[in-house]
Image (spheres, rainbow, N blue to C red):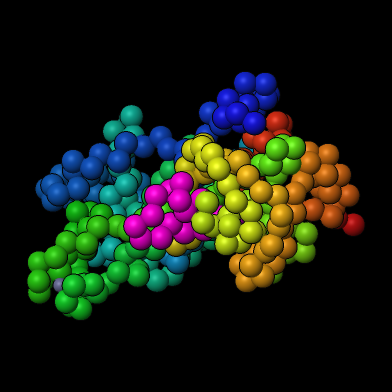
């Protein structure tokens, strides 16, 4: 299969790679040039149009609108809970509205009970372009801030800087930047155009997905694809092609999506990360999903998109649960 087939020349519009992934949508300019301008940040924070998103442990408050949409609950800064040190500047929109995230140990309660806490996996695909981009930025920063409170050079406690995008060490002067861990995720096909999907032991019964793994130090993305496929499934791959990427802040990954062409077909799973792997024809996959035997990956994951691109159209619906 050539790359152009996967990018969807013949696929229906909704299956093309150009359709944004749920977590790659954004409508707010990050306006990074303001991050070091304390006077500008203070003015933006106190402006009545500014909106603040409270984030806690990867969760935010969302509410359903009357017409059925899911929206972030954001408040003006004068309604935000007090917190000087855990304020992250997220950017400004085309109307000049500034957005901040505020990290708290718990989410604030609301009088009207319409708001509920939610994580990105649950609502990432339901939110608008603007809200999805704000939430993924806020959650990614929060995860990094919470786990990098001490200097990796000297061990001293670090302080927040650059409106949440840097941590600085007061003892040795080191500056620490948000960390992103590259991970490769790949749809492997063989000479019969079947797809290699695997399942991990702890996944729900029947869940099969693309293989994936972290890039190791001193390794190219293509080498990581070939190594992970071989380690997890025993299959060797030749040509590797990049498709698209997706932030995956659980806690700090960047998923880099590829297709890879197998040069061998014998499967031998590692039995640790991957418990079982199979070659699926499009017909195998359709029948498996329709009968309820196979559960495809979650819709917000790039894994679902890679499978859909190979399949050529949206995957069939699973049967209703009794
Ligand atoms: Zn230090």
Q: Can see residue 204?
A: yes
Give the residue furthest to the top.
9
Q: Quadrant of ligand 1?
A: bottom left
Q: Position of residue 320 (x, y in %)?
A: 85, 50
The relative height of residue 17 versus residue 45 in the rendered view (above or below) is above
Q: Nearer the viewer, residue 279 or 52?
A: 279
Identified at 16% across, 76% down, the residue is 154
Q: Is residue 173 left or right of residue 122?
A: left
Q: Nearer the viewer, residue 183 or 250?
A: 183
Q: Is residue 214 magenta?
A: yes
Identified at 41% across, 53% down, the residue is 182
Q: Nearer the viewer, residue 70 or 17?
A: 17
Q: Quadrant of residue 176?
A: bottom left
Q: Can see residue 247?
A: no
Q: Quadrant of residue 99?
A: top left
Q: Is residue 236 left or right of residue 97?
A: right
Q: Which residues are magenta?
A: 211-225
Identified at 39% across, 63% down, the residue is 143
Q: Position of residue 100 (x, y in %)?
A: 32, 50
Q: Nearer the viewer, residue 58 or 254?
A: 254
Q: Quadrant of residue 96?
A: top left
Q: Is residue 319 left or right of residue 311?
A: right
The relative height of residue 158 versus residue 182 in the rendered view (above or below) is below
The relative height of residue 72 versus residue 232 in the rendered view (above or below) is above
Q: Position of residue 303 (x, y in %)?
A: 60, 47
């Amino acid at each position: 299969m050539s790359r152009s087939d996967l990018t969807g020349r013949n696929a229906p519009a909704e299956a093309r790679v150009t359709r944004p992934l749920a977590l790659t949508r954004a409508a707010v300019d990050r306006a990074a040039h303001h991050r070091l301008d304390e006077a500008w940040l203070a003015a933006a924070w106190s402006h009545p149009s500014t909106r603040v998103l409270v984030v806690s442990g990867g969760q935010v408050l969302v509410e359903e609108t009357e017409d059925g949409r899911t929206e972030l609950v954001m408040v003006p800064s004068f309604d935000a809970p007090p917190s000087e040190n855990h304020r992250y500047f997220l950017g400004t929109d085309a109307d000049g509205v500034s957005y901040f995230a505020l990290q708290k140990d718990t989410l604030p309660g609301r009088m009207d009970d319409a708001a509920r806490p939610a994580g990105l996996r649950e609502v990432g695909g339901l939110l608008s372009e603007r809200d999805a981009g704000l939430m993924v930025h806020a959650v990614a920063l929060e995860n990094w801030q919470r786990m990098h409170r001490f200097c990796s050079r000297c061990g001293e406690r670090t302080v927040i800087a650059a409106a949440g995008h840097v941590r600085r060490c007061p003892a040795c002067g080191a500056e620490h930047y948000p960390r992103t861990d590259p991970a490769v995720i790949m749809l492997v096909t063989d000479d019969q155009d079947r797809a290699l999907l695997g399942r991990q032991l702890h996944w729900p019964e029947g869940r099969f997905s693309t293989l994936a793994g972290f890039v190791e130090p001193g390794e190219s993305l293509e080498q990581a694809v070939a190594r992970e496929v071989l380690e997890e499934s025993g299959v060797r791959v030749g040509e590797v092609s990049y498709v698209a990427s997706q932030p995956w802040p659980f806690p700090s990954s960047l998923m880099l999506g590829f297709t890879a062409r197998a040069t061998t077909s014998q499967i031998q799973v590692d039995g640790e990360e991957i418990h079982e792997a199979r070659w699926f024809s499009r017909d195998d996959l359709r029948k498996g999903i329709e009968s309820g035997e196979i559960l495809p990956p979650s819709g917000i994951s790039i894994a679902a998109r890679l499978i859909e691109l190979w399949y050529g159209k949206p995957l069939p619906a699973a049967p209703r649960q009794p």
